Amino acid sequence: MSLRYEEHALRPPLDRFVECVWFLSAPRAASPAAPERVVPDGCPELVFQFADPCLSGRPDGVLERQATALLVGPLTSSLLVAPSGAVTTMGVRFRPGGLRAFVPMPVDELADRQVLPEDLFGRDARSIRDRLAEAGDDGRRIGLVEDFLLSSLSDPDRPDRPVEHAIRRMLRRRGPVEIESLADELGMSRRHLERSFRAETGMTPMLLGRMIRFQSVFRRLASAEPDWISVALDCGYYDQSHLYRDFREFAASTPRQFLGEPGAFGGAFVSRERLERFFRPS
């Protein structure tokens, strides 16, 4: 598949909460494309589709046609995605915990769900997809999305929250941090920290830390036949079987199976270039 994938940073203060805006396009394939795995990273996505909507579903379920505008909440396991025809898609990738600055409800209510933008952002979201489609070029679409997000941002100048500090610690560490010591450092009980994490990220601190460590694996890969023992140890796993357990949980596959699948579509989201932005502090 001939595919174009590009990322663009947004201006402050949005860059604190949004990793990037991305554009993905591909022509209609001569034959149906095989579904590809999108692995969880803690990042919700606001997606707008201007050509044929993609199909998506769980590895053990049926693929269904997506809406032309949708919010994909934070995933806790892999999602299969396949084009249904030509692809012209724009996405807003929120940082882990970033979506909470724009929506009124706790983010754990959105985990593993796909919802319409108007259900989260209100009446103004109903026409945003059509205005983006009419804009016609990437630059104008970025401007429209920035204006839309700024109008939805509850408190642009809010001070750092404890969860934001904790997430930065995880990203610097490339994986989980000890919850008790983190709670003590933040002056919170463990229970309060975990409750705040669920509300702002959609998951527990330990689960997000494990996802971050799993993402570091793709940043480490440099060949189609990696030394999995070295990869596991370099990324903070106890051993190779420890890494393989995360592949089963987060990718519903083995490492060899994952790397052997065609990756032009889903592979864009675990490229080294994309992960440099993911691990870059906000």
Image (spheres, rainbow, N blue to C red):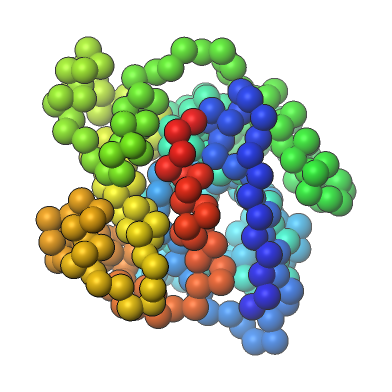
In the picture, the quarter occupied by the N terminus is: bottom right
> In this picture, is 35 found above or below 220?
below
> In this picture, is 19 found above or below 179?
below
**Residue 249 rendering spot, x and y as whole percentages:** 27, 60
- In the rendered view, does 249 fall on the left or right side of 111? left
**Residue 201 rendering spot, x and y as whole percentages:** 39, 34
Q: Residue at x 23, y 56 (%)?
A: 234
Depth check: give the residue in front, 115 or 154.
154
- In the rendered view, does 168 fall on the left or right side of 240? right
Depth check: give the residue in front, 206 or 166.
166
Q: Quadrant of residue 198?
A: top left
**Residue 255 rendering spot, x and y as whole percentages:** 30, 72
Asked whether the viewer can see residue 225, the reply is yes
Q: Quadrant of residue 257?
A: bottom left
- In the rendered view, does 1 fall on the left or right side of 171? right
Q: Residue at x 62, y 71 (%)?
A: 83
**Residue 120 rendering spot, x and y as whole percentages:** 58, 33
Q: How many marks?
A: 0
> In this picture, is 112 found above or below 189?
below
State the residue lying farthest toward the bottom.
31
Depth check: give the residue in front, 267 or 58.
267
- In the rendered view, does 88 fall on the left or right side of 236? right
Q: Quadrant of residue 8?
A: top right
Q: Residue at x 56, y 35 (%)?
A: 18
Asked whether the viewer can see residue 199, the reply is no
Q: Residue at x 35, y 24 (%)?
A: 165
